[in-house]
Image (cartoon, helix red, strand yellow):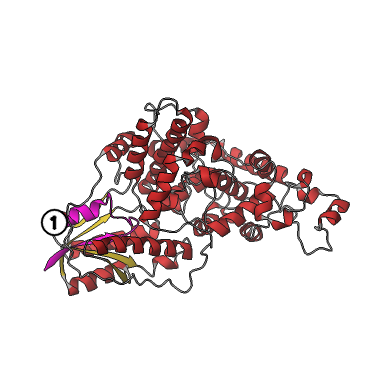
Amino acid sequence: MTCQIVWFKRDLRWQDHAALAHAAARGPVRCIYIVEPGYWQLNDTALQHFEFIRESLQALNSHLQTLGGCVEIHTGEAVEVFDRLLKETSFTEIHSHEETGNAWTYARDLQVKTWCETHRIPWHEYAQFGVVRRLKNRNQWQAAWEQHMHAPQEKPKAIHFASKVNSLPISMQAPAHLKHNPLHRQRGGRPLALAVLRSFLNARSLGYRGGISSPLSAPDACSRLSAYLAYGCISMREVVQMTRAYIEELPPQASRHRAGLQAFMSRLYWHCHFIQKLESEPEIEWQNMHRGYDGLREESFNEAFFEALKNAQTGWPMVDASVVMLRETGWLNFRMRAMLVSVAAYPLWLHWQPFGEWLATQFLDYEPGIHWSQLQMQSGTTGINTTRVYNPIKQAQDHDPQGLFVRRWLPAMRNVPDSWLFEPWKMPDNVRQSTGTDAASSVQIHTPLVDLSSATRSAKERLHALRKNDKVRAGKKAVIDKHASRKTFSTRRTSTKSQAASSQMGFDF
C-alpha cells in the first residue's frame, strides 16, 4: 500500500497543521519525527530542547493514538531515514512545514530536496509562520503576513494511517553528551500550550502593559507562549485568531485588558518580521548583517569575561541574577535578555556569535530567526538600528527597586543593605563585616570585570566612529531595503515607546 509521509519538525501539533491536512487528503499517512545525530552535536543545542521536544511528541502521539495512528520516531540523518523508509514501504510524497532554522537544518533540507528529486518523490512544504520563502521585496511582506493569519486553519477531515497504532509511549533517548535541562523550565506539549494561552487571554494579559519589563512581574504578565511557538505546539495563526476574537468580545470598559492584548498582537507581528530576516539571509547566523562591521569585535574576544558572564560572576548583581534565573528556568523576560546582550556587547566587548551560541543553549524558546537577528541588533552590527545600551545598575533601580529579584537569585546579596545592593563592591569594610561578605567570609562579592562607565563609553565611541565611515554609511541602504520593516501600524494604535519595546531582545511575549 502506498502512503504519504508527514515529517514533523518544529510543528509538534495536530491542529492547524497544513502538512498533516494535505497528506491525509491524498491517502494513507505515516507520521514521522527524525532524531538527527548531527543536529544534536551543534553548539546551539541543549538537553532542555531535546526534552521539551520529547514531551511535545508524547502529547502528539497520545492524540494520534486516539485516531488510530501514532508518530514514529526514527534516528539517523534525514536522507538515511528516507532511504530506509523507501525500502520498507512505497511512499509517494513527503509533506512538512517550512523550517527557518540554523545553517545545519538549511543544509539538511537542501540534501533532502536533492534526494527527493533523485527519487522523483514530490516534497510539499507549507508555511509555518507568516514567513515568506523566496520573498522578492520587503514591501510585499506585511500583506502576506495578514493573508496567512486571516486564512482558515488547516485540519484534516479524516486520517487513514498506513502504520499500525502503537499503544506504548514513544521511545526517544537523549544523546549522552547533551547538557543543561533546568529543573524549573516549562514542559512541552499542545495541551499545556493551550492552557497557557487561555490563562493569558482570560486573566494574565491584564498585566501585560507595564508588567513585562520587570523580571518580578514578567513571569506572569508575559504570555509565556514563546517555547510553544518555537516548537510548533500551537500555531501562530491559532494565537493570532484567538487573540483577535477575544479582543472583539471584550466589553467597552475593558480598556486595560484590550490595551494589553493589542500590545501582545504587535509582538506576534514582530516575531515573524525577525524570522523573515534569517529566511531572507541565512548568513546572519555567522556573519555581520552589515559587512562594514566585520572585525569590530571578532579579534578581541575575552574568554575570561565570557566565562565570568556564563558563571554569573560579572559583579553587577542584576546581570548575575538574570544569568542564574535563566540557568534555573530556561526563561528570562525581554528586557533582561536585552540587558545581557548589551553588557556582553559593550562594556565586555564580546562578539555576538560565540556568546549567542551559549545563550541559545540557555533559552528554552530558542528560535534561530529571532535569536540571531536580535543578537546583531542589540550588538549594533545591523547598521540600521539605534544603539541600545542597557546600564545594569539603572535597570536594577528601575525594575527591581527593592532588590527582590536580585536577592532571590543571588543568596550572597540577601544581607546586603538596600543602599549598596546594586553596587556592593563599594561597601565599606565595616558594612561588609556586618553582612558577612568580607574577605574572611565564604560568601563572595565579585568586583565588576570592568569599570562600567568608561568601558561603555569606549565601546560606543568605537562603534560610532565606524558608523561615520563613508563606506559603512553607504552600505546601510542595502540592509534597509532587504530587512527593514514596512509596518504602518494602521490597524491599531501603538505608541512609539511600545514599538521600540516590541523590537527588544528575546520575543518571550
Does residue 339 appear in the picture of this structure?
yes
Towards the viewer: 474 or 1: 1
Q: Quadrant of the N terminus?
A: bottom left
Quadrant housing residue 163: bottom left
The residue beneath circle 1 is: 26
Is residue 358 found left or right of 122 in the rendered image? right
Residue 283, given in percent of the width and then of the height, sits at 41, 52
Task: Please tell me whether residue 153 is drawn above or below residue 124 in the rendered image.
Answer: above
The vertical placement of 250 against 131, above or below, is: above
For mark 1, does the 10 Å Cα neighbourhood hold few (<14), some (14 to 19), or many (20 or more) residues? few
Q: Secondary structure at mark 1?
A: helix
Question: 318 above or below 29?
Answer: above
Residue 231 visible within the image: no
* Residue 403, x across and y down, in percent: 69, 46
Q: Position of residue 263 (x, y in %)?
A: 45, 34
Residue placed most toward the observer, 294 or 247: 247
x%, y% of residue 349? 62, 50
Could you tell me how many numbered marks the image carries?
A: 1
Side of 371 relative to 279 (left or right): right
Q: Is residue 7 magenta?
A: yes
Q: Amino acid at mark 1?
A: Arg
Is 274 in the magenta?
no
Closer-to-camera residue (358/320): 320
Single out the residue that lies furthest toward the left: 1
- Residue interval drawn in magenta: 1-24
Residue visible at 28% across and 37% down?
150
